[in-house]
Amino acid sequence: MADDKKKEAASAAPAGEGGDGKKKGNLFLTVGIVVGILAIYAPVTYLLVPKPPANEEEIAQKAKEDSLRLVSEAATKMGAVTDDTPIDFVVNISGTEDRFLKASVVFEYDEKNIALGAELRKRAPTKYKDMLIKHMSSLSLTEITDPLERDKICKDLQRMINASLPTKMGEVRSVMFTTYITQ
């Protein structure tokens, strides 16, 4: 009987070793697959996840670049214009007796702000025309004829119009001359 037990143990030992070999092979295969997946995902994650800025200078530089991009986009994007109701006016040029300016003005505003467009059109024929006439008739011939001064005039008119609008209504982006004739 003891011999039978020894034979069984001897015959079971090689089978057990073979079973342990399969387990070790499966373990190596599993570890190899996990290491392979990590080897692929680690560089991809490193490349795709943005790195935080190292210091405050980089943060400030990034904010400046973003604001410049937004300003550039806003400057190149054309908004809605009140070109269906331009403000036409003729004024005598200050300091002259026989010189005058004939001009037409339109306002540019955010096209999403429909209420602002309606308010500008409502005020244009009376209130804004009066404001424009008073302002433009106070300018000298030099101010009216100098091209650089024309930009200043547009900015001044824009400030005046925006100041006259109700709060939270929105603002005029720019004032543009569609006609500008001096004689």
Image: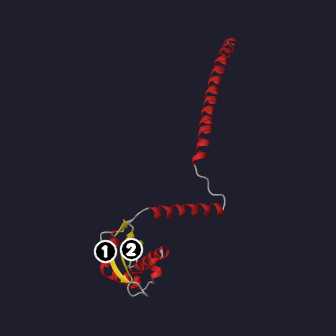
> Residue at the spot x=34%, y=80% of the render?
90
- As helix, strand or loop, the secondary structure at mark 1 comes to helix
Q: Quadrant of residue 23?
A: top right
Q: Is residue 135 above or below residue 106?
A: below
> Residue at the spot x=61%, y=46% of the render?
46
Q: Of 163 and 89, which appears nearest the observer?
A: 89
Q: Which residue is mark 1?
A: 121
Q: Of 101 and 72, which appears nearest the observer?
A: 101
Q: Which residue is mark 2?
A: 180
The crowding category of the residue bearing disc 1, from other C-alpha atoms within 10 Å (few below 14, some 14 to 19, many at least 20), is: many
Question: Where is residue 29 shown, x and y percent of the image?
Answer: 61, 29
Question: Where is residue 16 shown, x and y percent of the image?
Answer: 64, 21
The crowding category of the residue bearing disc 2, from other C-alpha atoms within 10 Å (few below 14, some 14 to 19, many at least 20), is: some
Q: Quadrant of the C terminus?
A: bottom left
Q: Quadrant of residue 153?
A: bottom left
- Along the polypeptide, which appears first: circle 1 or circle 2? 1
What colour scheme does the image use?
A: secondary structure
Q: Quadrant of the N terminus?
A: top right
Q: CA distance from mark 1 to mark 2?
A: 21 Å
Q: Of 73 and 6, which appears nearest the observer?
A: 73
- As helix, strand or loop, the secondary structure at mark 2 comes to strand
